[in-house]
Image (cartoon, rainbow, N blue to C red):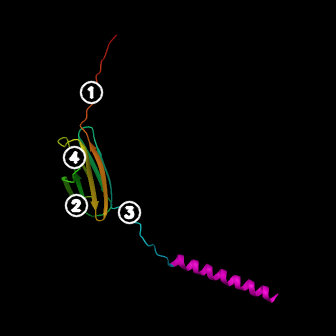
């Protein structure tokens, strides 16, 4: 009987020690990586009228850099959005550019979005006939 109480007590002490250790680890645990909101949100797309639409909504007062590059990496357009401007929208006329792939880069600090855009002046010829009866 004494042996049974001794084993039960050891089991209870071990269980309490494990529970205490687990509770302490959760109580004092600090996240290794803080999750923060994105500094900005952005969208970019090509339109039928040979332009690129860009929209940026900033979540922090920080400069944002917008760059348009061709396939060779040459900068064709660059703009800095000031710290105080919390939103930005632009329509870039690319009708003079050759058909091909272009890259929009939007960057704030270490955060960056890079998007490939295809510019094409391909037009479709549609023949329409109207008949009246």
**Mark linked to residue 125:** 1
In the image, 30 versus 122, the foreground residue is 122
Asked whether the beta carbons under mark 4 and mark 3 sit within 8 Å of each other, the answer is no
* Residue 131 picture location, percent across and down: 32, 14
| Above or below, comparing residue 125 to residue 6 in the picture | above
Give the magenta range: 1-27
Query: At 26% across and 27% down in the image, what residue appears?
Result: 125
Query: Which of the two discs, 4 and 3, labels the residue nearer the N terminus?
Result: 3
Q: Quadrant of the N terminus?
A: bottom right
Q: Position of residue 123 (x, y in %)?
A: 25, 32
Residue extending furthest left?
96
Dot 4 corresponds to which residue? 92
Mark 1 or 4, nearer chain start:
4
Image quarter in which the C terminus is found = top left
Front one among 118 and 132: 118
Identify which residue is drawn at 58% across, 80% down: 21
Query: At 80% from the left edge and 89% from the top edge, which residue is drawn?
Result: 2
Residue that carries the numbered disc 3 in the rendered image: 37
Query: Reading the chain from its start, which is encountered first: label 2 or label 1?
Result: 2
Q: Is residue 14 magenta?
A: yes
Q: Position of residue 39 (x, y in %)?
A: 33, 62
Point out which mark residue 93 bears: none
Give the mark, 2 or 3, whose residue is nearer the N terminus: 3
Does the magenta stretch mainly form a helix, a strand or a loop?
helix
Q: Secondary structure at mark 1?
A: loop
């Amino acid at each position: 009987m004494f042996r049974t109480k001794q084993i039960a007590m050891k089991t209870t002490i071990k269980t309490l020690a494990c529970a205490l250790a687990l509770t302490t680890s959760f109580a004092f645990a600090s996240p290794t990586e803080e999750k923060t909101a994105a500094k900005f949100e952005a969208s970019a797309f090509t339109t039928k009228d040979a332009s690129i639409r860009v929209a940026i909504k900033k979540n922090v007062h920080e400069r944002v850099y917008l760059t348009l590059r061709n396939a060779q990496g040459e900068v064709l357009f660059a703009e800095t959005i000031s710290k105080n401007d919390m939103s930005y929208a632009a329509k870039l006329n690319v009708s003079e550019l050759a058909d091909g792939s272009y890259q929009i880069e939007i960057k704030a600090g270490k955060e960056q979005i890079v998007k490939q855009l295809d510019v094409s002046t391909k037009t479709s010829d549609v023949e329409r006939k109207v008949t009246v009866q």
